[in-house]
């Protein structure tokens, strides 16, 4: 099957709405989780023209550490992504992604250079948003989106990216 995602609309909201309906159509014909997540990420990257879009999964550490800081036996490990080569492993509470995991909520960073704990994977990235994805109230993955523009993410991105995060969570069931 050959699919291309064509995002229509002038406003950011219209673009996300157009993208969401295409994402829903893409995933309803396929059962494989990684195949669906890969296509969601490609649709998001190319449909919205972001610098980097990817998912990190919560996975057990190869050599578990003491449980002193909570979830000490797990870390984020890079999954399907589109964009420049990225960091592969991120600890609980570290960087923007590890913070979204720890706080169990979306984190928007207007200027990555002003977020003290930001993990720089690409010098082109200027702003970032990370959405936690939940399974039985626990974070099992985070969706990470980077932009080469400063202050590129707002409440509209949060609303629609969280909707995409919910689709990913449902696909994982
Ligand atoms: N900047 C992220 C790391 C992942 S990359 O952006 C792909 C962070 O601080 O968690």
Image (cartoon, rainbow, N blue to C red):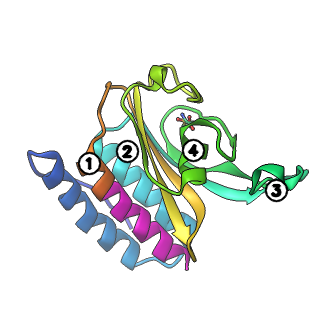
Q: Using a 10 Å C-alpha cutoff, classify the residue at mark 4 as few (fewer than 14 neighbours), some (14 to 19) or many (20 or more).
A: many
Circle nearer the N terminus (1, 2)? 2
Q: Position of residue 67 (x, y in %)?
A: 84, 55
**Is residue 151 placed above or below 81 in the rendered structure?**
above
Structural distance between the alpha carbons of marks 2 and 3: 31 Å
Alpha-carbon span between mark 3 and mark 1: 33 Å
* Mark 1 vs mark 2: in front: 1
- The Cα atoms of the two marked residues, 4 and 2, are separated by 22 Å
Earlier in the chain: of badge 3 and badge 4, it is 3
Q: Position of residue 13 (x, y in %)?
A: 16, 52
Q: CA distance from mark 3 to mark 4?
A: 16 Å
Disc 4 under 8 Å from ligand 1? The reply is: yes
Ligand 1, image quadrant it occupies? top right
Q: Label the magenta part by its dominant secondary structure.
A: helix
Residue with the mark numbered 3? 73
Mark 4 touches mark 2? (CB < 8 Å): no
Residue ID for mark 4: 99
| Residue hosting label 1 | 155
Q: Residues within 10 Å of mark 2 (few under 14, many from 20)?
A: many
Quarter of image, res 14: bottom left
* Helix, strand or loop under label 2: helix
Provide the secondary structure element on which disc 4 rests: helix
What residue is at 41 percent from the left and 59 percent from the top?
A: 40
Q: Which residues are magenta?
A: 160-173
Q: Quadrant of the C terminus?
A: bottom right
Nearer to us: label 2 or label 3: 3
Residue 7 in sight here? no
Q: Is residue 152 magenta?
A: no
Q: Which residue is mark 2?
A: 45
In space, the residues marked 1 and 2 are separated at their CA atoms by: 19 Å
């Amino acid at each position: 099957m050959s699919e291309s995602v064509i995002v229509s609309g002038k406003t950011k909201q219209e673009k996300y709405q157009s993208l969401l309906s295409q994402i829903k159509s893409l995933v309803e014909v396929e059962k494989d989780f990684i195949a669906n997540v890969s296509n969601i990420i490609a649709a998001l990257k190319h449909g919205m023209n972001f610098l980097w879009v990817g998912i990190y999964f919560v996975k057990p550490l190869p050599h578990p550490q003491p449980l002193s800081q909570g979830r000490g036996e797990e870390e984020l490990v890079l999954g399907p992504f589109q964009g420049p080569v990225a960091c592969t492993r991120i600890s609980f509470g570290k960087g923007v992604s590890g913070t979204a995991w720890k706080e169990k909520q979306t984190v928007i960073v207007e200027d990555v250079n002003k977020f003290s704990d930001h993990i720089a994977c690409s010098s082109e990235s200027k702003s970032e948003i990370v959405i936690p994805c939940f399974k039985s109230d626990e974070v099992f993955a985070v969706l990470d989106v980077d932009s080469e523009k400063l202050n590129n993410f707002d409440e509209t991105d949060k609303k629609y990216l969280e909707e995409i995060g919910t689709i990913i969570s449902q696909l994982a069931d």
